[in-house]
Image: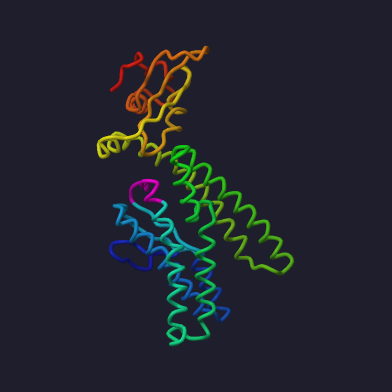
Amino acid sequence: MQIGQIGGIRIVFNPFFLILLVLLGLAGYLPHGLILFGIVFLHELAHTLVASAYGVQFSAIELFPFGGVASSEGFYDPDPFAEAVIALAGPLTNGVLCILAMAVAPYEVIPAQWYDYFMRANCVIGLFNLLPAFPLDGGRVLRAYLALKLGYRRATERAAFMGRVLAVALGSVGAAGVYYGFASVSLPVLAFFIYLSAGREQRMAGYVFVRYLTRKKQELDAAGVMPAEQLVAYGDVPVKDIVRHFVPKRYHVVLMINAAGAVEGVASEMEVVSSFFEQGIDTPLEAVVGQPGDFD
């Protein structure tokens, strides 16, 4: 449900958030819901403002009870460093809000009856989002870190797996909590949301990775010079398995070896990427390589 726009960015309530607001209203806690909405909104707005500084433009912000998801019309594939900074902007905003609240506490800018809730909500949302699992902000920081070591695709798979592990753990604790009366039903619902979102991120990773490959030459052209990374593979290995090991900010040279370990040919990154798109993802490396010393 869209509730408005700010600077061309659509603000959307997820049904879970709407249900939460309705339940809080029926229980007489609507002010708590409005405070929660404001905190989550500022959390997500911080993401979009920092993202715009890196040239990443979002078209919509969908708000959930414990955070939100910013989406763009195209694929969201920033530089790993930029992704980490953008992700950390949300929890950092929650920390800043807590500091500001403490600073103005003597002046009762925030009514005393709402002050404790405001502080707790910021702490919970900020710290919870730092957990290293998709779709939380900590999961995006983890993906950015792993992308420099494992490549974008495998890093996304790892972060999404962590998200599903977290969801199963939360769901199990939540189910036990509901049964024994020490937790509300919101915890299993949150676990369900995290599980679905982690799966969505993993499914989107393939599409985003393809876009990333199309931009590799632009990355080299923009940098002018890049560190090189060598990979070694047998001739029957398909290019789809090779590009999975490509990492940002590196130019890759692939050495084709035989069973004895001797180098039989060399393929540059551009040759492998071109083959990936033009000849097909199952093209074997031996159909791509030139002789040692032949580079684009």
For the point 28% across and 62% down, the residue is 8
Hey, which quadrant is residue 6 in on the image? bottom left
Q: Nearer the viewer, residue 6 or 99?
A: 99
On the question of residue 14 being in view, the answer is no
> Left or right of 3: which side holds 234?
right
For the point 56% across and 52% down, the residue is 195
Q: Is residue 18 magenta?
A: no
> Left or right of 193: which side holds 153?
left
Q: Is residue 78 magenta?
A: yes
Task: State whether residue 117 is above or below residue 294.
Answer: below
Q: For the magenta stretch, what is the residue range? A: 73-83
Residue 199 percent coordinates (x, y): 52, 47
For the point 42% across and 52% down, the residue is 84
Instruction: Report the residue that reaches farthest toward the bottom.
Output: 107
Task: State whether residue 14 is above or below residue 259.
Answer: below
Quadrant of the rendering where the N terminus is positioned: bottom left
Residue 111 percent coordinates (x, y): 47, 86
Residue 290 percent coordinates (x, y): 34, 15
Quadrant of the rendering where the C terminus is positioned: top left
Q: Nearer the viewer, residue 285 or 291?
A: 291
Q: Nearer the viewer, residue 197 or 219?
A: 219
Q: Main secondary structure of the magenta part?
A: loop
Residue 42 percent coordinates (x, y): 40, 68
Instruction: Count the labels in the image.
Output: 0
> Left or right of 286: which side holds 198?
right
